[in-house]
Amino acid sequence: MSNNTIFDKIINKEIPADILYEDEYTLAFRDINPQAPFHVLVIPKAKIATINDVTEQNSHLVGHLYVVAAKLAKEHGFAEDGYRVVMNCNEDGGQSVYHIHLHVLAGKALGWPPYTNTKKELL
């Protein structure tokens, strides 16, 4: 049994994705369930399950994800008006795929908080 995630399959080109950017460290593709007019996922090619698994040795990859997010926002015309970048961690944080990834959302004004917390009352 394999512990590959859907992102591993996208990286390995086993399943299709609408890829907007790729380099030796990262891959960026459109989210299949967009929450904004522009919703892209930026992932490292190296598998890091959660933010809790980021170490000094792989932390440069997280910084590179943000460089790619800014590049995409600029290329698609959202850098000046603004965009949101989110990384979720574990179940209560909203993580559903255990391979770290940035959500880059743009194309409309984004409110705060981003959604209602259904598990616990907001303080």
Image (cartoon, rainbow, N blue to C red):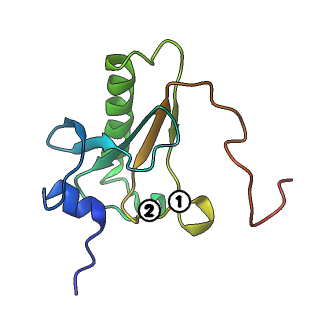
Count neighbours of disc 1 (C-alpha within 10 A) and say few if under 14, some if 14 to 19, many if 20 or more: some
Front residue (pair 59, 24):
24
Exactly how many numbered labels are in the figure? 2
Identity, as a three-letter code, of the amino acid under mark 1 = Cys
Q: Is residue 77 above or below residue 72?
A: above
The numbered mark, 2 or 1, whose residue comes first in the sequence reads 2
Residue drawn 86% across the image and 53% down it: 123
* Residue 46 location, quadrant: bottom left
For marks 2 and 1, give the CA distance: 6 Å
Q: Is residue 85 above or below residue 33?
A: above
Identity, as a three-letter code, of the amino acid under mark 2 = Thr
Q: Position of residue 3 (x, y in %)?
A: 27, 78
Instruction: Left or right? Give the position of 76 relative to 14.
Output: right
Count neighbours of disc 2 (C-alpha within 10 A) and say few if under 14, some if 14 to 19, many if 20 or more: some
Q: Is residue 36 above or below residue 77?
A: below
Front residue (pair 49, 22):
22
Q: Which residue is mark 2?
A: 50
Q: Quadrant of the N terminus?
A: bottom left
Q: Position of residue 38 (x, y in %)?
A: 43, 32
Helix, strand or loop at label 2? It is loop
Q: Which residue is mark 1?
A: 89
Q: Position of residue 26 (x, y in %)?
A: 24, 44
Residue drawn 38% across the image and 46% down it: 31
Q: Are marks 2 and 1 in contact (CB under 8 Å)?
A: yes
Front residue (pair 64, 32):
32
